[in-house]
Amino acid sequence: MLKLLPVKLQDKEGWAGDLQAAFRALQIQPTAEHFCAVTAIVEQESSFQADPVVPGLPAIVRREITERSEKYSIPETVINWMLNTTSSDGRSYGKRIDALRTEKELSDLIEEIIARIPAGRDLYPNYNPIRTGGPMQVSVEFAESHARARPYPYAINGSLRNEVFSRRGGIYFGSAILLDYPAPYDDMLYRFADFNAGRYSSRNAAFQQALSRLSGRSLVADGDLLRYKNGSPAAEPSATLGALLFIRHALQMNEAEIQRDLRLEKLAGFGKTPLYNRLFALADRAGAQPRVSLPEIDLKSPKIRRKLTTQWFANRVNGRYRNCLRQAGLATGRPSSKTTPNR
């Protein structure tokens, strides 16, 4: 494992130890393919920095403050008062913003501001806009949901959010997102796409493409079959649902049955539902349809200043992955990604 890490990487033993510990805790087979997959994500997302530096972060934060104050009509005097207020380390919040280098520093600053507002943690429990962090840019929301389903294996330093920004926590939760679920893919490329777009997005994007051909309706194959609000299906119907209802008679399913199966879209079981099987049975009559496809998603973030997509991300990481496999002396044709944790 050590020989596959970057030659000039500091504390190679520490990185290797955290990777091995994460695999043990998650019961993921410690194969070269799995190791290379995780390190490819780490290299892409942080260049092996536990808390990566974000270039121009103070300017990004200042721009966000201006946009939010204009959106919510917050008086400039209130913003200036907040920026000039003395923080816990003796500097003003404005000076701390100007010295920001990493998302962890920004997340800690926001948490401090919320804590200083009377009843702030009750009024703004999920206000912190820093949603991802650490060496694999893991979602804090995912980490919290994963920890509810499976106990976090390490002593928590302050909060689970803090663990996401740490090397050991970031690697643990990142490995879980990438590898700790059964996927119907023969190529690791699609796990990389799912890491960026959400589990089973590559399978669901192929479902949307088949549905578009069958229904004659134009659909964006983004891998989300329903609309979501705050992590739950929204009342507003999605374009995918509309297309399915348009062909419901051909599917021999009613609306309730279609919605029942669509609610499984984030799970492995969706691929075994009547809806999934009937749609592909119809679509395959015009020729075999692919069961997997890279999701069509434009990546948006205050940190992103050029057009990036999930397809770009997946291909970029896949290149790093294949380089790692070559370094390990393994063939790089189309390594299978169907291997699941050894439980």
Image (spheres, rainbow, N blue to C red):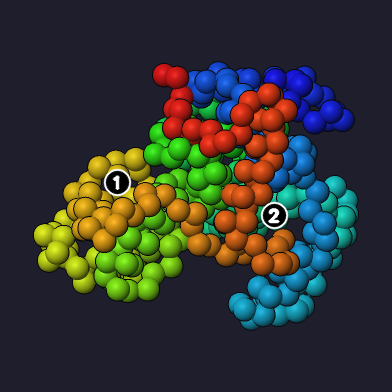
Q: Quadrant of the N terminus?
A: top right
Residue that appears at 50% across and 62% down: 296
Lower sequence index among marks 2 and 1: 2
Residue lying farthest to the front in this orientation: 287
Is 288 situated above or below 69?
above
Q: Which mark is residue 270?
A: 1
Judge from the rendering whether residue 340 lies leftward or rightward of residue 11; answer left or right: left
What is the number of the mark on residue 186? none
Q: Residue at x 73, y 75 (%)?
A: 66
In the rendering, at what x and y percent does residue 305 appear? 73, 67
Taking the image as shown, residue 241 lies to the left or right of residue 25, namely left
Q: Which residue is mark 2?
A: 110
Disc 2 and disc 1 in contact, CB within 8 angstroms: no
Amino acid at circle 2 = Ile
**Which quadrant of the rendered structure holds the C terminus?**
top left
Residue 250 pos. (x, y %)? 14, 64
* 41 or 339: nearer the viewer: 339
Kind of residue at badge 1: Phe
Considering depth in this image, is 137 or 97 the residue closer to the camera? 137
Distance Cα–Cα, label 2 vs label 1: 39 Å
| Residue 74 sits in quarter | bottom right
Between residue 125 and residue 38, name the one nearer to us: 38
- Specify few, some or many for label 1: CA neighbours under 10 Å numbering under 14, 14-19, or 20 or more: some
Q: For residue 182, which quarter of the picture?
A: top left
